[in-house]
Image (cartoon, rainbow, N blue to C red):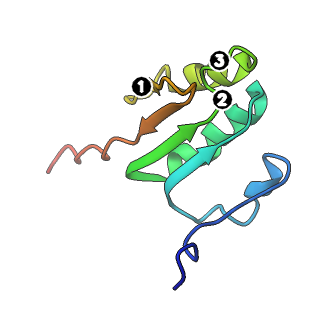
Amino acid sequence: MGREDWIIYRQGLIPSTFSGLESEKFAFAHVDVDIFESVADCCRFIYDRLTPGGILLFDDYGLPSCPGARAAVDEFFKDKSETPLALHSGQAVVIRHPNPAPENA
């Protein structure tokens, strides 16, 4: 396996670029879109497929020219256990918490 054989690059319009990835799990996803609806679509699709400890990186979270990116991320994570961490680069990162243990464990 080459250096990038395990990386999937998807270019195109969201959410249609997710077609065929419904059964995949992700350890890392770099979301490089900057309008509210595209970022929200990414959150909805990727979050449930993100492995525990997996990283979700939002490229345009803190950029003044992309207010929709931050609004979509903040809205999506308002009822989640994870909190986006704003970086000095203008990006934000979320690390998926492990799944909670079953009640009878």
Callout 3 secondary element: helix
Identify the amino acid type marked 2: Asp
Q: Which of marks 1 and 3 is nearer the N terminus?
A: 3
For image coordinates 16% across by 48% down, the residue present is 104
For image coordinates 61% across by 25% down, the residue present is 61
Callout 1 secondary element: loop
For image coordinates 39% across by 42% down, the residue present is 96
Residue underneath mark 3: 71
Category of crowding for the residue at label 3, using alpha-carbon neighbours closer than 10 angstroms: few (below 14), some (14–19), many (at least 20): some
Q: Which one is nearer the viewer's eye here, 73 or 11? A: 11
Residue underneath mark 1: 83
Residue underneath mark 2: 60
**Residue at far front of view:** 89
As measured in the structure, the alpha-carbon distance from the residue carrying label 2 to the one carrying label 3 is 11 Å
As measured in the structure, the alpha-carbon distance from the residue carrying label 1 to the one carrying label 2 is 16 Å
Please provide percent x and percent y for residue 3. 52, 75
Give the label, 1 or 2, closer to the camera: 2
Instruction: Tell me: 20 left or right of 5.
Output: right
Q: Is residue 59 above or below residue 99?
A: above
Instruction: Tell me: 40 left or right of 35.
Output: left
Total marks placed = 3
Identify the amino acid type marked 3: Ala
Identify the amino acid type marked 1: Thr
Q: Is residue 51 above or below residue 20?
A: above
Callout 2 secondary element: loop
